[in-house]
Image: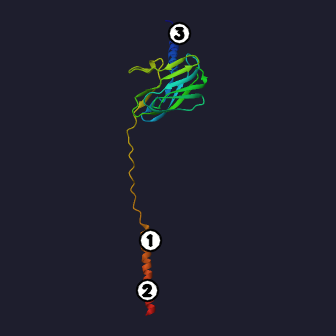
Amino acid sequence: MSRTTRRGSIAAATALTAGIVLAAPMAASAHVGVSPEELTAGDYGVLTFSFSHGCEGSPTTALRITMPEGLTSAAPTLDGDWVIDIERGDDALVSAVTYTAVSPVPNDMRGAVSMSVGLDENAPEALAFPVEQHCIEGTTEWTEIAEKGEDPHDLEAPAPLVAVVAGSEEHHASPEPIATEEEPVVLPTILSGAGLVAGVAALIVAALAYRRRA
């Protein structure tokens, strides 16, 4: 192989590798993501769902997010860019939230919505939030959930997933009362001192009266 041919092969391989490296983040960014990716059971947190694409390039008009079991509450964040609609189940808990864009989000521009959620102490190890992404043309359902042993990155349309970690089992005992030194009883001391002075004064008066009589 000539030096020119070898250089051409290396350049082609380098370009192919670079293309693969660049393609991976682009494929990953095509999903609806959620952050943070971990919450604590029995605690609260704010989840942000973001995307930077439309449905086959069509601008996004709405996101409908379904709440999983294991939540005790969900409160969407007010945002001037979105109109919010809340659905509730028979238990009065939020079952789904739909964010409708005031103006469609163009393809390749980042859009994001957020909500505060509360987790049950017995929440499962992972919470999946199925998302329906509605666009001017078409809808994409990000609802796939990886089976045990399956890599979520291998899914074509994975649902945003949040891992749940166990809460701390430390129990904060009520503080023991702090022992304080006994304060001196000031009032009885003053009264007893005043009585002693009065007694001495009475003796003096009695002595003077006796001397006058004498």
Which-is-in-front pick, marks 3 and 1?
1
Left or right of 93 on screen, residue 57: right
Q: Residue furthest top?
A: 1
Amino acid type of disc 2? Answer: Ala
Asked where in the image residue 144 lies, by quadrant, the reply is top left
Q: Residue at x 42, y 83 (%)?
A: 203
Q: Secondary structure at mark 2?
A: helix
Residue 206 has which mark? 2
Q: Secondary structure at mark 1?
A: helix
Instruction: Judge whether 154 appears above or below 201 on screen.
Output: above
Residue 8 has which mark? 3
Q: Tell me if mark 3 has few (under 14), some (14-19) or many (20+) residues whose alpha carbon lies within 10 angstroms of its own.
A: few
Please tell me how many numbered marks the rendered image carries: 3
Q: Residue at x 46, y 35 (%)?
A: 44
Give percent across and percent down for residue 196: 42, 77
- List the residue tagged with mark 1: 190
Asked where in the image residue 83 lies, by quadrant, the reply is top right
Instruction: Judge whether 62 appears above or below 77 on screen.
Output: above
Residue 138 has which mark? none
